[in-house]
Amino acid sequence: MPAIFLRNRAGHLVERMDLPDCDPVKLLKTYRQFKTINYLLSGWGRIYSKYLKPALQEGAETVLDIGCGGGDISRMICKLASRDGFNVRITAMDTDERALAYMRSTPLSEDVTVSSVSVEDFLASRQQFDIVLSNNVLHHIPENELPGFMDNSRKLAQRLVIHSDIRRDDLAYVVFLGSHLFFRGSFIAEDGLTSIRKSYRMRELRRLLSSDWDVHMMALYRNLCIWKP
């Protein structure tokens, strides 16, 4: 469905959970509820089967999860890889110490390392990973900074980069209006609507990114950006 009412991206908006003085109880519940949201809507099971598993079969072992939040995607990939018999080491990185504190308070596989090291610091130390990925990060990045972020993620990767994010859509916004009925006491409903308004359309990403990025739609109002060397 085209974005008519949401024709223009509202990149100036700030999600409540990103404010330093947000309600800590609601924030904790938001991290907990992310597990359900990501399981239902993120599509990383399909992404794993189509992109990550073939890379692991070709010898990829190290993964960087940029902006890992509560760590749901890192856990999911670790579980799927282990099920398929792959040895994978995942670095779950976020610059928000509250997210990292939540991750450290939950059970983690020994194959997942929690890190506050920034993308820029990884680049400065010349560290690389076989696979670099992110989930719901791109809509946080201003248009003038997005090409640089994507280029940096590519410099960190040896085999594959995957960025998955929400796609701005009028119907997605209308459907998500009902989320407050299921996700109470957190920022999920309010911030989810803000995220939709901040997110990119596929043609916007194609305009901003170089031609070596494969940008296409996924189900459930998602954009997927793929790079391979």
Image: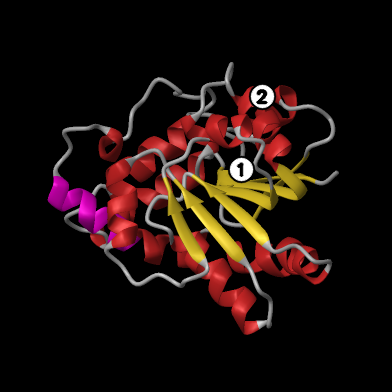
In this figure, what is the number of numbered marks? 2
Which residue is under mark 2? 147
Q: Residue at x 48, y 29 (%)?
A: 5
Residue 140 percent coordinates (x, y): 46, 32
Q: Residue at x 66, y 31 (%)?
A: 152
Within 10 Å of the Cα at label 2, are there few (<14), some (14-19), or many (20+) other Cα atoms?
Answer: some
Residue 123 percent coordinates (x, y): 62, 33
Name the element at disc 1. loop
Quadrant hosting residue 213: top right
* Residue 92 against residue 207 in the figure, above or below: below
Q: Which residues are magenta?
A: 24-33
Which residue is under mark 1? 1
Q: In the figure, is residue 142 to the left or right of 205?
A: left
Q: Amino acid at mark 1?
A: Met
* Residue 141 against residue 60 in the figure, above or below: above
Within 10 Å of the Cα at label 1, are there few (<14), some (14-19), or many (20+) other Cα atoms?
Answer: few
Residue 185 visible = yes
Indicate the quadrant containing the N terminus: top left, top right, bottom left or bottom right.
Answer: top right
* Residue 223 against residue 37 in the figure, above or below: above
Indicate the quadrant containing the C terminus: top left, top right, bottom left or bottom right.
Answer: top right
Q: Amino acid at mark 2?
A: Pro
Dominant SS in magenta: helix
Residue 114 percent coordinates (x, y): 43, 55
Question: Considering depth in this image, is 102 or 179 the residue closer to the camera?
Answer: 102
Question: Considering depth in this image, is 166 or 96 the residue closer to the camera?
Answer: 96
Name the element at disc 2. helix
Residue 222 visible = no
CA–CA distance in space, label 2 to label 1 = 26 Å
Residue 130 percent coordinates (x, y): 72, 53
* Residue 172 against residue 10 in the figure, above or below: below
